[in-house]
Image (tube, rainbow, N blue to C red):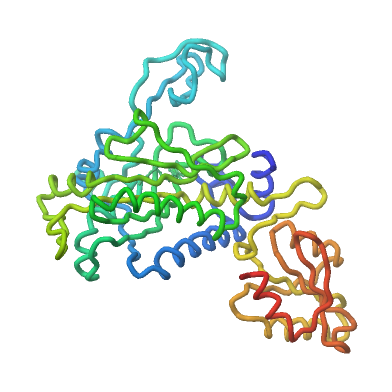
């Protein structure tokens, strides 16, 4: 596996990710996605959305606003309880999360032992809405997409004629004023979450919790094609459980900096809806012909797109030969899926390449690449993860065939143009 510096340098060099506001020195904990990164991010989101919304009759998609009334965050417990413990070094002014360092030791930055008291730091970012500065109202930028679902859930269910069990899924930006953003995309201040809140009768919650755990693991192993040996479940112990959760299980990935959380799956019970009922005085119950009136329990799957993308790159980046780096990514996730490389510029080659490109199925992202030697072109495509290169050469016009080259093995096959779509179907199945 590559180390983190190799991953960061690759992502920056190949147009995947760079620091936000880079030309002004960068903004800590915020990143921009370049052409290859934006496409990878979108493909991960689309696979998740297709799997969980398009192909599920009892899960509906949702898109709530980032700014909500402060009562939402009071009811959810974020105003009073969404804190991390923080300490500062009085000598060099470095700031740390107290649970990530040992304050019995000296400061890792300046080597002195001169700590402030531990203070609780609220992680929510805020802004102001309203035209006049003096009457402007302070509001929070959501630290999770989940609350936007909870406050709408019962209305959405009624309008969509859904009854439990049903789910609401959302992909969107969340913001946290992390004390120490670190490990590249792993802990950032602005990130995208993919969350599903699945509402069911409390009696059914333990079974749905188990079902969601296995569905979510197979998202990483089957749908994204990640290495199952690097993915693990970790159950939260009693002392670690959030106050609202009956059970919580993380999906962890073996990152270059250690085994870390990729996603949390939780049985949140009826905590969230009970809180919003209490604070809003609205009726957030469901009724069922057999089971009567009840406040549904919630099984939550909460995954970070940025963390997933980082894990996918760590999982597939082969740096064993520094002169020939290969991104062995799942073909479905590649930005360019088929590169068509005409070997010679003369003899109507580019025209033939265009003709072949037009005959390939429209669902693949394709490009024609003419610059550089064929070897260099193969290596360039390998590096950004293009799974298939099709080389059009001097014989193509005579035998109606092309050379197909496979990214991960470098193996080449001579294939009839007529058979290309069938071959691609197998590669991208
Ligand atoms: N609604 C529940 C919730 O938000 P969480 O464990 O705080 O739970 C869920 O966050 C997921 O969101 C994490 O597993 C991670 O993938 C992502 N995430 C959370 N904080 C993040 C951060 N600062 N940077 C990147 N991703 C983050």
Q: Residue, x 42% and y 44% (percent of image)?
A: 264
Q: Residue 294: give x, y in percent of width and height.
A: 15, 54
Quadrant of the image occupied by residue 118: top left
Q: Residue 68: give x, y in percent of width and height.
A: 25, 51
Q: Which residue extends farthest left? A: 281
- The number of discs equals 0
Q: Residue 121: give x, y in percent of width and height.
A: 35, 29
Give the quarter of the figure containing the N terminus. top right
Q: Which residue extends farthest bottom? A: 398
- When the figure is inspected, residue 346 is found, relative to residue 190, above or below; the finding is below
Asked if residue 48 can be seen in this view, the reply is yes
Q: Residue, x 11% and y 54% (percent of image)?
A: 282
In front of the other: 26 or 347: 347
Asked if residue 137 can be seen in this view, the reply is no
For residue 243, side relative to residue 420 (left or right)? left
Specify the quarter for ligand 1.
Answer: top left
Q: Residue, x 52% and y 38% (percent of image)?
A: 260
For residue 425, side relative to residue 293 (left or right)? right
- When the figure is inspected, residue 140 is found, relative to residue 374, above or below; the finding is above
Q: Residue 80: give x, y in percent of width and height.
A: 24, 33
In front of the other: 130 or 257: 257
- When the figure is inspected, residue 158 is found, relative to residue 305, above or below; the finding is below
Q: Residue, x 36% and y 36% (percent of image)?
A: 123
Quadrant of the image occupied by residue 394: bottom right
Give the quarter of the figure containing the C terminus. bottom right
């Amino acid at each position: 596996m590559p180390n983190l510096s190799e991953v960061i340098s690759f992502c920056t060099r190949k147009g995947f990710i760079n620091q936000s506001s880079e030309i002004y020195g960068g903004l800590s904990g915020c990143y921009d996605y370049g052409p290859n990164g934006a496409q990878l991010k979108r493909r991960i989101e689309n696979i998740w959305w297709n799997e969980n919304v398009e192909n599920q009759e009892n899960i509906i998609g949702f898109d709530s606003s980032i700014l909500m009334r402060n009562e939402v965050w009071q009811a959810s417990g974020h105003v009073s309880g969404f804190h991390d413990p923080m300490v500062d070094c009085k000598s060099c002014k470095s700031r740390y999360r107290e649970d990530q360092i040992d304050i019995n030791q000296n400061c890792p930055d300046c080597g002195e032992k001169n700590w402030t008291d531990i203070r609780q730091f609220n992680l929510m970012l805020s802004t102001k809405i309203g035209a006049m500065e003096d009457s402007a109202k302070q509001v929070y930028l959501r630290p999770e997409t989940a609350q936007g679902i909870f406050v709408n859930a019962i209305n959405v269910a009624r309008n969509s004629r859904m009854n439990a069990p049903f789910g609401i899924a959302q992909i969107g930006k969340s913001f946290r004023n992390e004390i120490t953003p670190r490990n590249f995309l792993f802990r950032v201040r602005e990130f995208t979450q993919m969350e599903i809140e699945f509402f069911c009768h409390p009696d059914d919650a333990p079974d749905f919790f188990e079902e969601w755990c296995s569905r979510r693991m197979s998202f990483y192993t089957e749908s994204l094609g990640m290495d199952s040996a690097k993915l693990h479940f970790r159950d939260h112990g009693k002392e670690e459980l959030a106050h609202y959760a009956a059970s919580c299980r993380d999906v962890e990935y073996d990152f270059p900096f250690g085994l870390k959380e990729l996603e949390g799956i939780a049985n949140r019970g009826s905590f969230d809806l009970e809180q919003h009922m209490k604070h809003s005085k609205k009726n957030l119950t469901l009724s069922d012909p057999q089971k009567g009136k009840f406040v549904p329990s919630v099984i939550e799957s909460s995954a970070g797109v940025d963390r997933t993308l980082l894990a996918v790159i760590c999982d597939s980046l082969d740096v064993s030969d520094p002169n020939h780096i290969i991104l062995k990514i799942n073909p479905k996730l590649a930005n360019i899926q088929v590169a068509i490389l005409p070997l010679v510029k003369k003899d109507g080659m580019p025209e033939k390449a265009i003709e072949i490109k037009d005959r390939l199925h429209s669902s693949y992202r394709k490009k024609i690449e003419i610059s550089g030697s064929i070897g260099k072109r193969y290596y360039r495509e390998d590096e950004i993860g293009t799974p298939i290169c099709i080389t059009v050469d001097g014989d193509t016009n005579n035998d109606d065939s092309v050379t197909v080259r496979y990214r991960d093995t470098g193996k080449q096959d001579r294939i009839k143009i007529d058979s290309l779509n069938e071959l691609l179907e197998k590669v991208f199945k």
